[in-house]
Amino acid sequence: MEILTNFSLKEYNSFKINAIAENFVSVNSIDELVEVLKLKEYPSKYILSGGSNILITKNIKGLVIHINIKGIHEESKKNNITEIVAFAGENWHSLVQWCLKRDLGGIENLSLIPGSVGAAPIQNIGAYGTELKDVIISCDAINRETGKIKTFNNKDCQFEYRTSIFKKNANYIVISIKLKLTNKKHNLNLSYKGIQDKLDESNIKIPTIQDISSAVIKIRNEKLPDPDKIGNSGSFFKNPIVSIDKIEELKANFNNVPFYSFHKNKYKIPAAWLIEKAGFKGKTFGDYGVHKDQALVLVNYKSAKGSDILNLSISIQKAVKLIFDIELEAEVSII
Ligand SMILES: Cc1cc2nc3c(=O)[nH]c(=O)nc-3n(C[C@H](O)[C@H](O)[C@H](O)COP(=O)(O)OP(=O)(O)OC[C@H]3O[C@@H](n4cnc5c(N)ncnc54)[C@H](O)[C@@H]3O)c2cc1C
């Protein structure tokens, strides 16, 4: 385990921001993680995994700890359920592929989400009708202060739309997750219409979990910019949740307001629609801007600074607040 100094994080964040970590270490085991957490000479420690849900706006002082703890195994198999454990440093999509190879169902709709297994619970990753909370039994996490491992069951994680106890309180570092997957009869989730459309295009009448994964991969490749080509962190903002009164107010002032039911008289409005209506879709400002097809995705075309993108996000928030009286909340973590 080597602690590197003045380390460029450009290849460690999907926005491709060239920020510098004063000190950087990659940990390959739980023991190594516990050891670096004890280092008193670095009072400030930042946990970094795949860097696909962060915007780095300045050089990082202290120690950046890159989680690279690997391993996936089957824990138990009973009737139609197989429980698996995956360690934090595994790539999320590699885990999905590992499961598909063994015909384990439950996370096929979450195919191709960038990033690591350990970060998946942080914002309760979700896509195309499925969220991590639907399949996770528990996660093990280390307390930064004491170095002790605690098991959080599904309820303890306080999962909600793009958040969890870990996002609200950064005191715990996730080291592994345990998932409950189907091994024979799969409960396919076709609630997102785009998936059914892709299956129809390929004339698939009785889909498998592998077919669902392929459909999701096709949709994502068509819709989302590839961070290896254009720096981005996926959806920059969360979709705001509003009351029915707010929906009625918007309908009275704007045509074709898109919204969908969320939970108990609450509705989600696509943030992309608000950003487009505020005139930001496709706008570029030199090296950075808002993607031309996905208004929710802010992009670094070449060598923008994190602070440029942060300022753009603040301008968008102000415009949306002024026009719609709605607060847009960032989904990415801003450092
Ligand atoms: C093109 C693109 C598409 C995306 N699509 C989706 C999508 O469909 N759905 C979705 O939910 N997300 C999506 N995202 C966001 C991102 O992929 C997820 O949030 C992912 O889980 C982030 O993983 P990461 O390893 O890159 O985390 P990082 O960006 O490294 O970290 C994110 C946050 O979690 C903390 N963290 C990281 N690892 C740990 C750990 N082990 N323990 C404690 N804290 C930790 C970090 O300190 C940071 O605050 C997308 C991103 C991109 C670039």
Image: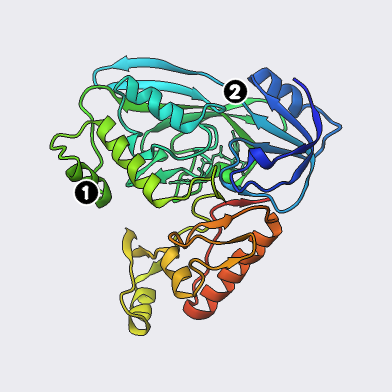
Name the mark on residue 69.
2
Q: Nearer the viewer, residue 327 or 55?
A: 55
Q: Nearer the viewer, residue 128 or 218?
A: 218
Task: Indicate which quadrant contains ligand 1.
Answer: top right
Q: Earlier in the sequence, mark 1 or mark 2?
A: 2
| Number of other residues with Cα within 10 Å of mark 2, as a class: few under 14, some 14 to 19, many 20 or more | many
Q: Residue type at mark 2: give it.
A: Ile
Q: Residue type at mark 1: give it.
A: Asp
Q: Residue 314: name its quadrant.
A: bottom right
The residue at 39%/45% (across/down) is 221
Q: Is residue 108 left or right of residue 229?
A: left
Q: Do the CB atoms of the residues marked 1 and 2 lie less than 8 Å apart? A: no
* Residue at disc 1, CB closer than 8 Å to ligand 1: no
The residue at 41%/68% (across/down) is 273
> Which quarter of the figure is the N terminus placed in?
top right
Element class at badge 2: loop
Q: Position of residue 55 (x, y in %)?
A: 64, 51
Q: Is residue 264 visible?
A: no
* Viewer-side label of 1, 2: 1
The residue at 52%/65% (across/down) is 328
Q: Position of residue 84 (x, y in %)?
A: 41, 21
For the residues marked 1 and 2, what is the alpha-carbon distance in whole angstroms? 38 Å
Q: Position of residue 15 (x, y in %)?
A: 61, 48
Residue sitting at the far bottom: 253
Name the mark on residue 197.
1
Residue 331, compared with residue 254, is above or below; it is: above
